[in-house]
Amino acid sequence: MSALPARLPSDPATLMQHCTHLRVLVSLSVGVGACAAPDADPESHAFDPSVPRWSLSVEAEVGGADEAEGMILGGVMGGVLLDDGGFALGEGQTLEVRFYDGRGAFRGARGGRGQGPGEFTFINWVDSPDGVGVTAWDPQANRVTSFPGLQGDPSTRSLDLGAAGPRGSGAPVGLLADGTVVVLHGARENDLTGAVEGEHRDTARVIAVGADDSRILLARPGTERFVASDGEQSGAPLVVFGSEPRATVMGPTVVAGGTDTAELTRLDPTGAPLDPARIAVPALAANPDAESAVRQAGVAADSAVWARIAPYNPTLDFATLLEYSRDLWTSLPARDTLPRFSELRGDRAGHLWVRAYVLPTADSVTWARMDAGFDAEGRVVVPAGWRILDQEGDRLLVALRDAADRWIVRMLRAEGAS
């Protein structure tokens, strides 16, 4: 996300030109999506109550009020579970990759702020190709840095998409065992500048970025997008709604699909399609209460965004901005269904974790774990405010904030899973 200007304009029209990208991200986060019809058989799917529900136990916790070395978390910018039972985190203030053991004890850190080899200007994603080494992405420098562990020289290389796509329009979604970075790439909604109201075309591509080359594994051209545009001002889109692509690395394979469909495509590392699998996750029927919840959540999210911007310009006319926001959200078209799911996450053991879509007002969310055949093995229910950093086998790594707004990271074990 681009940096905010030193001083923002106070008039709503000009301010919205600066904040369009924030509004689009907020809009997408509350599920403004047009979706397919529900499955004919809604009784057999990943989130069915008959799928075993696993309980969660805390195995390690870091952050919070603990001020010991390595325990103060100024921001959690990603995390990954390691095969030795511990985990690693991307720390947002120091820009370190920190290593912890299975009890949460701090083992050491790599990286730090800077522009040299093994240093970062920002961290926004952390993963591991083999459960031992850790790779982190610096989106500002557009490069990935890999650490073999607490010892050994780091390696840094540009996340160069080559002919597959322009810089800055993709984000990593996983690592293959050889260190190849899998990127989900497309024309992002906040890049659709100059759009006018009506129908637009977009593409979504899954790209494998190796040490020496980049190749497209999967391309989905011609996806319809509908843009509610602010034509009287800048012409930039304010709300984009349509199917959203998702991709992840699942063991030695890559899995991709859209949130409004139940079809997932599995690829080998060369991009050859494996068995297309249908996951039976039905779309949810929309209703007036759901529509109202989405609109109210949108207004609330806008209020939160502008509250964060306020320090840059204390003279903002919040009353006018909120009226503008309410008018915009009220004008959104009604939907017939809600997304089938909101997130995919694979692990090195070959499981696929699927996050159920829930309304913005929900206080909990369900994740289901599927096997290699996309059959649901079990599910866990976590508070909606928890951010899942990683899932591996029967362990989960989550980030949350305590009552004092301090970051906490917990490593949990799903009892009953294996």
Image (cartoon, rainbow, N blue to C red):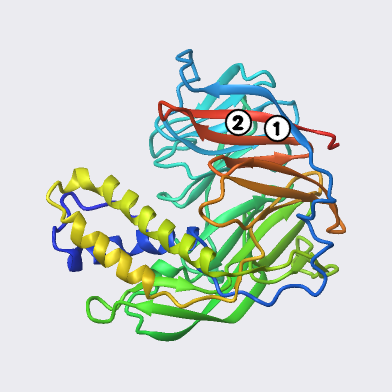
Question: Does 350 sit above or below residue 103?
Answer: below
Residue 127 in sight from this viewpoint: no
Query: Outermost residue toward the top?
Result: 68
- What residue would you read off at disc 2? 88
Describe residue 164's horizontal placement relative to residue 266 as left or right: left
Residue drawn at (84%, 62%) of the image: 44
Looking at the rendered structure, the kind of residue marked 2 is Ala
Residue drawn at (20%, 57%) of the image: 319
| Quadrant location of the C terminus in the rendered image | top right
Residue drawn at (18%, 49%) of the image: 6
* Discs 1, 2 touching: Cβ within 8 Å: yes
Query: Outermost residue toward the front?
Result: 289
Q: Quadrant of residue 134?
A: top right
Residues packed near mark 2 inside 10 Å, few (<14), some (14 to 19) or many (20 plus) = many
- What residue would you read off at disc 1? 82
Give 161 or 333, whichever is nearer the viewer. 333
Describe residue 246's horizontal placement relative to residue 160 as left or right: right
Q: Secondary structure at mark 1?
A: loop
* Label 1, label 2: how far apart the Cα atoms are: 7 Å
Could you tell me residue 76's position as x and y percent?
49, 35
Question: Does 85 sit above or below residue 228?
Answer: above
Query: Outermost residue toward the bottom?
Result: 198
Question: Does 236 sit above or below residue 84?
Answer: below
